Amino acid sequence: MTLPAADVPLFTELEVDLAVVLGQARVPLREMLKMSRGAIIALDTALDDPCAVMVNGRMVARGEVEVNAEAMALAITETHRAGAA
């Protein structure tokens, strides 16, 4: 389905929830219940692995975490478009 050009600006102003996934872990419930502040959870990714950028449960991009003295950010390294081969 292709939208008429006049309708496209209506959608570009919509906001979406975006999540950046650093990695995943499988943890027994008993271990999770023992966790408190300062607990460390080992993830299934390496420090230099790209993070997945998710919108509505779908990966739309990958990127690398960047940190400076003021903030964390994500530099997009690749994008995934719906329907792209």
Image: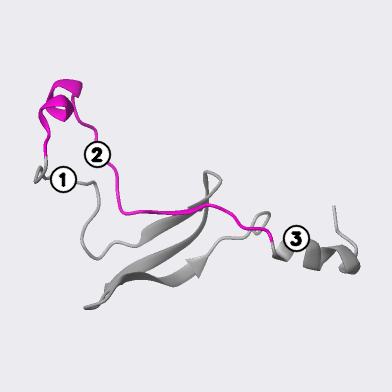
The kind of residue on which mark 2 rests is Ala
The answer to which quarter of the image holds residue 10 is bottom right
Residue 35 percent across, percent down from the top left: 12, 33
User: Which element type, helix, strand or loop, lies under badge 2?
Assistant: loop
Left or right: where does residue 35 sit relative to residue 67?
left
Q: Which residues are magenta?
A: 14-36
Q: Are marks 2 and 1 in contact (CB under 8 Å)?
A: yes
Q: Is residue 23 magenta?
A: yes
Left or right: where does residue 85 sit relative to residue 38?
right
Crowdedness near tag 3: few (<14), some (14–19) or many (≥20) residues, C-alpha within 10 Å: few
The answer to which quarter of the image holds residue 8 is bottom right
Identify the residue shown where x is 43% and y is 62%: 62
The answer to which quarter of the image holds residue 16 is bottom right
Whichever of callouts 3 and 2 sits on the residue coming sooner in the sequence is: 3
User: Which element type, helix, strand or loop, lies under badge 3?
Assistant: helix
The residue carrying mark 1 is 42
User: Which element type, helix, strand or loop, lies under badge 1?
Assistant: loop
Residue 64 percent across, percent down from the top left: 34, 68
The kind of residue on which mark 1 rests is Ala
Quarter of the image with the C terminus is bottom right
Left or right: where does residue 33 sit relative to residue 50?
left
Measure how far apart labels 2 and 1 are at the Cα level. 7 Å
The residue carrying mark 2 is 25
Residue 44 percent across, percent down from the top left: 24, 46
Residue 54 percent across, percent down from the top left: 49, 52
Name of the residue lying farthest toward the bottom: 69
Task: Point out which mark residue 11 bears.
Answer: 3
Q: Is residue 33 magenta?
A: yes
The kind of residue on which mark 3 rests is Phe
Count all numbered tags in the image, as a single digit.
Answer: 3
